[in-house]
């Protein structure tokens, strides 16, 4: 019987919720997609690794104490660790910025560094808000979930070396001993909430007066639920509580200011999961990642779960939210929302999920998911635009280290050594249109876009990995990086091949037969990333026995 | 060394693009691999069934006890007519696969205590019909009465094919030489080797392929394989069974 062709395009992302039969009709989806990301340009791309911020000279801000929060600020990054807050330009030299008695007009470097520390007692996971205002770099407010101190205010002006700059720092009094955990900037106000003594209280500062909670425009709101996060979204302030979500409107009009419930049925599990992406707010709810999208009608709100495809993963997170820390990041140029979860003990086994906003074959924009493993970023991860307008990404771990996030070809393990990226992509079981027919596979052609020399393995398993079916050994696939004029150096040592296609097709003769089979493409190395675009299969159908 | 069961099975699997076996997992073959093993044995049995008297199935080397014809013998007992062809066999499952009934030979040479002059004669095969019609009654009367018995002259085959009988009932110990062929032993272990020369393995593979393609509902390929098998079997017969010249003679003048 003549062979027949079959081709699948890698699209749809990880699907752990559909049944194996449902997945027969979605061959492009993945049943495993670990340390891959859905590429907005198509296909599944092995993720980048991360590298030490500061390179070989990288230093920890506070020995090996947990990184409790990171925030892109000015031309550097702010890190919270132990009972202190630090700023660095390069990851090598860290400047402690939680200083007391700083002059109202600012301190120069030597004065600032000579000030006593304003200890961030019981500092927990930190939250940041930047009020851009009219200053060079804006003003940063830091609160933390330890709820042991007042919000911390920091501003820096000047440029060049740290020693040439001016520093402003102080603690902001909200209301007596109210030490809020959460903060955000909303419509010219600093809004803080959720102190341990007043977990359901929300305080907002005076208008255009973010360090004063008693001036004109300030106020207080008490809800009947505990606040876990705040986020300004369009005209409204969204207040995420444990079991409900509220909307504060008209904060600048004392006669029309209002707090209305969006839902009293769904809350947010962790405020550090809240991000804005694609015109929506996304957050971690008990039933998964949800969006909070304003609709055309003012005041109307649509709630929707966007993580149904990875519901088992979300259930695991929700079931263990008491032991997991959660952090999230948006990588804008990849249209990605990343959520990391784990604890100080998960180390190199820490996991995360990546949601890429992508338009599917039906023309709808949706999140398509994948997983990460080995990126210990649940303590802190951040992205933001620096003063040059460049988007920067960082994460910190429980060993006190800060890393450049999403860069390089390797991970770094808990011991500080370079580690392989263990990546795997697995298709659903494919029935080639008829589950009843026995098929003998002849060869496959894999379309991959290498970003360097790539060596992956291909595994084929028949009949849903049935132990009663013979299963072939793994195949090694090597893809050379093409040399493109103007961009690459010729020579095998550089891993470039003259005349190679930019999206080469790798042909692999395979063996075995079954009524269905899946393909797993996996790598365990420190090679360059690659994107799997699709798979072509040549097979021979042979009866229905 | 002749081709092993593992080699044959893997050749079949490889030809049909299936996952091959190793000596380590051969005994644990599953699914299509197990079927490939079965196809090899079925093909082997098919070749044997096509010609039960292949030389490679002979029970013993011919002429091993020179100058006698035959590769196995049974010694008679005075007063006993029927003898199992294969005394060590407990059932027809383990009996010889084939017997040359036209070449039974009776002698006292080699019999313990026998001396010259020796008895030496061919035993003529007669059917049980002839025997019961003309010999059985008087021999049974003799057995029940005077017990003179006699020197056997005929050989008869029991209806269940498990025994031969001699007529007359022997009066003493003789050796009855004949030619026997064994039943094939199914290949089992990975290093079990086929019993015929490697040059004929394509015939076995063609037949195995025929069974395999039938399993895969591929009648066209099965037909091709069957044709290969038939032609191969013909050549195998020609090479192993009919290598001697054949003559026709006539007494016309």
Image (cartoon, coloured by chain):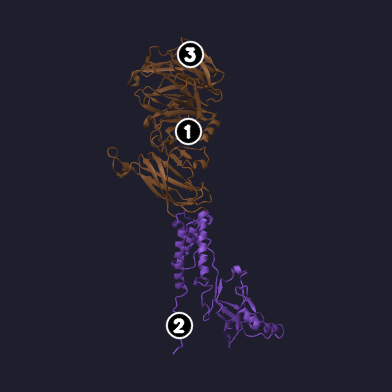
**Rendering coords of residue A156 (x, y %):** 38, 18
Secondary structure at badge 1 equals: strand
Name the subunit of mark 2: B
Pick whichever, B101 or A434, lies toward us. A434
**Rendering coords of residue A247 (x, y %):** 50, 19
Q: Nearer the viewer, mark 2 or mark 1?
A: 2
Apparent side of residue A466 relative to residue A363 in the rendered image (left or right): right
Residue at mark 2: B248
Name the subunit of mark 1: A
Secondary structure at badge 3 equals: loop
Residue A88 found in image quarter:
top left
Residue A361 position (above or below residue A266)? below
Write down which chain is painted purple.
B
Residue sitting farthest toward the bottom: B253
Residue A531 position (above or below residue B161)? above
Q: CA distance from mark 1 to mark 3?
A: 36 Å
Write down which chain is painted brown.
A
**Rendering coords of residue B168 (x, y %):** 64, 83
Q: Nearer the viewer, mark 1 or mark 3?
A: 1
**Rendering coords of residue A407 (x, y %):** 38, 33
| Mark seen at residue A173 | 3
Question: Are the residues flagged by discs 3 and 2 from a single subunit?
Answer: no
Residue at mark 1: A352
Question: Are the residues flagged by discs 1 and 3 from a single subunit?
Answer: yes
Q: Quadrant of the N terminus of chain A?
A: bottom left
Q: Is residue A109 visible?
A: no
Name the subunit of mark 3: A
């Amino acid at each position: 019987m003549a062979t027949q062709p079959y081709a699948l395009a890698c699209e749809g992302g990880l699907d752990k919720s559909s049944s194996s039969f449902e997945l027969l009709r979605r061959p492009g989806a993945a049943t495993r997609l670990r340390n891959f990301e859905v590429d907005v340009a198509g296909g599944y791309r092995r993720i980048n690794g991360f590298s030490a911020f500061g390179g070989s000279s990288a230093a920890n801000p506070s020995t090996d104490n947990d990184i409790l929060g990171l925030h892109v600020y000015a031309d550097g990054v702010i890190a919270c660790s132990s009972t202190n807050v630090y700023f660095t330009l390069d990851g090598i030299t860290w400047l402690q910025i939680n200083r007391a008695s700083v002059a109202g007009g600012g301190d120069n470097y030597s004065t600032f560094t000579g000030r006593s520390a304003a200890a961030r007692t019981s500092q927990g996971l930190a939250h940041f808000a930047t009020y851009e205002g009219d200053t060079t770099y804006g003003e940063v407010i830091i609160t933390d979930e330890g709820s042991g101190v007042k919000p911390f205010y920091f501003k820096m002006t000047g440029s060049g070396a740290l020693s040439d700059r001016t520093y402003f720092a102080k603690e902001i009094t909200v209301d007596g001993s109210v030490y809020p955990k959460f903060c955000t900037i909303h419509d010219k106000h600093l809004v803080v909430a959720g102190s341990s003594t007043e977990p359901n209280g929300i305080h907002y500062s005076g208008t255009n007066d973010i360090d004063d909670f008693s001036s004109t425009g300030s106020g207080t709101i008490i809800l009947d639920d505990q606040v876990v996060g705040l986020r300004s979204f369009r005209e409204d302030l969204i207040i995420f509580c444990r079991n409900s979500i509220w909307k504060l409107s008209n904060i600048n009009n004392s006669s029309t200011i209002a707090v209305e419930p969006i839902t009293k049925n769904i809350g947010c599990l962790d405020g550090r999961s809240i991000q804005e992406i694609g015109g929506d707010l996304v957050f971690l709810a008990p039933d998964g990642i949800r969006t909070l999208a304003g609709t055309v009608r003012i005041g109307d709100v649509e709630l929707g779960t966007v993580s149904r495809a990875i519901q088992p993963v979300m259930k695991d997170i929700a079931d263990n939210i008491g032991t997991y820390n959660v952090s999230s990041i948006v990588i804008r140029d990849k249209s990605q929302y990343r959520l990391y979860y784990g604890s100080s003990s998960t180390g190199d086994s820490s996991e995360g999920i990546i949601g890429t906003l992508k338009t599917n074959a039906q023309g709808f924009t949706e999140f398509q998911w994948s997983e990460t493993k080995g990126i210990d970023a649940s303590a802190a991860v951040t992205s933001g635009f620096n003063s040059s307008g460049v988007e920067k990404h960082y994460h910190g771990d429980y060993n006190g280290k800060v890393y450049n996030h999403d860069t390089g070809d390797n991970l770094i393990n808990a011991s500080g050594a370079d580690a392989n990226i263990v990546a795997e992509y697995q298709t659903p079981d494919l029935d080639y249109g008829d589950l009843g027919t026995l098929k003998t596979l002849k060869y496959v052609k894999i379309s991959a876009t290498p970003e360097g020399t790539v060596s992956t393995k291909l595994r084929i398993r028949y009949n849903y990995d049935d132990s009663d079916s013979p299963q072939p050994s793994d195949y090694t696939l090597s893809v050379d990086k093409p040399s493109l004029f103007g961009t690459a150096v010729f020579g095998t040592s550089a891993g470039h091949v003259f005349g190679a296609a930019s999206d080469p097709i790798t042909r692999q003769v395979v063996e075995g037969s079954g009524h269905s089979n899946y393909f797993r493409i996996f790598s365990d190395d420190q090679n360059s990333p690659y994107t799997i675009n699709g798979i072509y299969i040549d097979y021979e159908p042979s009866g229905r026995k | 060394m002749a081709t092993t069961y593992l080699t044959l099975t893997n050749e079949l699997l490889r030809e049909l693009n299936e996952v091959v076996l190793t000596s380590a997992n051969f005994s644990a073959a599953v699914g299509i691999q197990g079927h490939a093993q079965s196809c090899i044995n079925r093909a082997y049995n098919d070749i044997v069934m096509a010609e039960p008297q292949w030389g490679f199935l002979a029970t013993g080397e011919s002429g091993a006890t020179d100058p006698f014809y035959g590769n196995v013998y049974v010694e008679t007992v005075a007063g006993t007519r029927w003898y199992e062809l294969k005394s060590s066999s407990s059932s027809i499952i383990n009996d010889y696969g084939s017997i040359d009934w036209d070449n039974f030979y009776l002698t006292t040479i080699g019999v313990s205590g026998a001396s010259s002059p020796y008895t030496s004669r061919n035993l003529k095969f007669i059917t049980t019909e002839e025997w019961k019609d003309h010999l059985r009654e008087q021999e049974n009367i003799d057995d029940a009465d005077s017990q003179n018995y006699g020197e056997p002259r005929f050989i008869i085959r029991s209806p269940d094919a498990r025994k031969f009988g001699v007529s007359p009932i022997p009066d003493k110990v003789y050796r009855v030489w004949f030619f026997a062929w064994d039943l094939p032993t199914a290949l089992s272990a990975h290093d079990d080797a086929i019993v015929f020369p490697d040059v004929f393995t394509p015939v076995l593979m063609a037949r195995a392929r025929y069974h395999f393609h039938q399993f895969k509902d591929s009648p066209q390929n099965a037909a091709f394989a069957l044709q290969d098998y038939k032609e191969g079997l013909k050549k195998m017969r020609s090479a192993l069974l009919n290598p001697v010249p054949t003559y026709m003679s006539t007494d016309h003048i």
